[in-house]
Amino acid sequence: MDNLLLVFTSLLIGILLRRSPKSPRDTHEVLNRFVIYVSLPALVLVYIPAIEIDRTLLYPVLSAWLVLLIAIIIIPLLGKLAGWDRNTIGCLLLTAGFGNTAFVGFPVIEALYGSEGLRIALLVDQPGTFMALSTAGIVIASIYSSGRTRKRVILRKVFLFPPFIMFLLAICMNLGGVTFEGAILGTLEKLGATMAPLALVSVGFQLKFRPDRELIAPMAGGLVVKLLIAPLILTTLYFGILGGHSLSVKVSIMEAAMAPMVTGSIVATSYGLNPKLASYMIGIGIPISFATLTVWYLILELLI
């Protein structure tokens, strides 16, 4: 419950800061830079080295990558049919393609399925959503922000992206059985803890309650893909084809049905991929997701 309160409090703070005449107009850009260059790399170094790689990762981790794959298939097609520009499509891939599996996901899953469900949710978030954003997400951001830029330039952007550099370091640490401890770990945890409030304040700072008319259609399309189509496909795959009936499957599908990822929105904004749309996908997507999550929970309970 504390995390849910944090979500709405931080969004409200951002909205109030925007209304204050003393707030610089580029406040959200400063917050985004801190999140990308400090908070996110710190979280990578805290969690990735400590992940235990085994078979229990299959359903949870796969669900995060499947959501991204679904978005990659559907959203560019929608964009082509609707005539959306590259920035809009890239923004939707970075928001509808990644779920809010931590800030919203953790408290929801713990409330519904207890501590065992939360353990599975951590697998969805860290080696799943978080890893996907740190790798494929940065590739997507680089491609859609660069237009016809050479592949060499895109790869340079990816490999020089601070969270990705820390991701590579964290993977090496994991394989070598090395983790941070003591004061270093404590410092990284505190820096990482700033990501949620700062990212959400940034979203709130950019949020308007009357979206520009031209953004309503792409926002609706992105939210339908994220909140309805992606979890529907995963439910069909996990229950109908693979025959999964475990708690791991239920948590994986519920996490797939979460609202768009805040950090994905920050990455989209940092790369200039329709920042207004990115903020609407979060600010409007999170409240709507509570209604759709209730429906998915009831459906999954009926299936078991």
Image (tube, grey):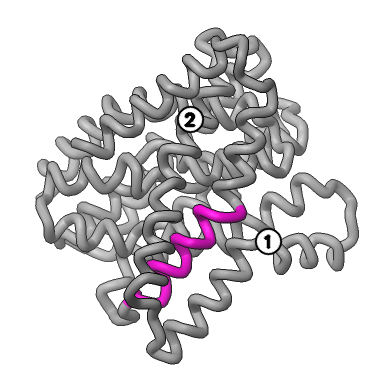
Left or right position of 82 against 119? right
Residue 123, compared with residue 211, is above or below; it is below
For the image, the number of numbered tags is 2
Q: Quadrant of residue 153?
A: bottom right
Q: Is residue 106 magenta?
A: no
**Considering the image in quadrants, where does the N terminus appear?**
top left
* Kind of residue at badge 2: Val
Residue visible at 74% across and 53% down in the picture? 142
Residue 303: give x, y in percent of width and height: 14, 47
Residue 39: give x, y in percent of width and height: 50, 53
State the mark number for residue 161: 1
Q: Secondary structure at mark 1?
A: loop
Q: Quadrant of residue 156?
A: bottom right
Asked whether the viewer can see residue 41, the reply is yes
User: If you read the primary sequence from the N terminus, does the residue marked by circle 1 or circle 2 appear first?
Assistant: 1
Task: Return the residue nearer the eye: 75 or 207.
Answer: 207
* Kind of residue at badge 1: Phe
Q: Secondary structure at mark 2?
A: helix
State the mark number for residue 233: none
Residue range highlighted in magenta: 37-51
Residue visible at 67% across and 15% down in the picture? 214
Q: Main secondary structure of the magenta part?
A: helix
Residue furthest bottom as drawn: 176
Residue 14: give x, y in percent of width and height: 49, 23
Residue 145: give x, y in percent of width and height: 77, 45
The label nearer to you, 1 versus 2, is: 2
Left or right position of 78 against 102? right
Write down the residue under mark 2: 201
Mark 1 surroundings: few (<14), some (14-19) or many (≥20) residues within 10 A? some
Mark 2 surroundings: few (<14), some (14-19) or many (≥20) residues within 10 A? many
Left or right position of 233 against 265? left
Asked whether the viewer can see residue 93, the reply is no
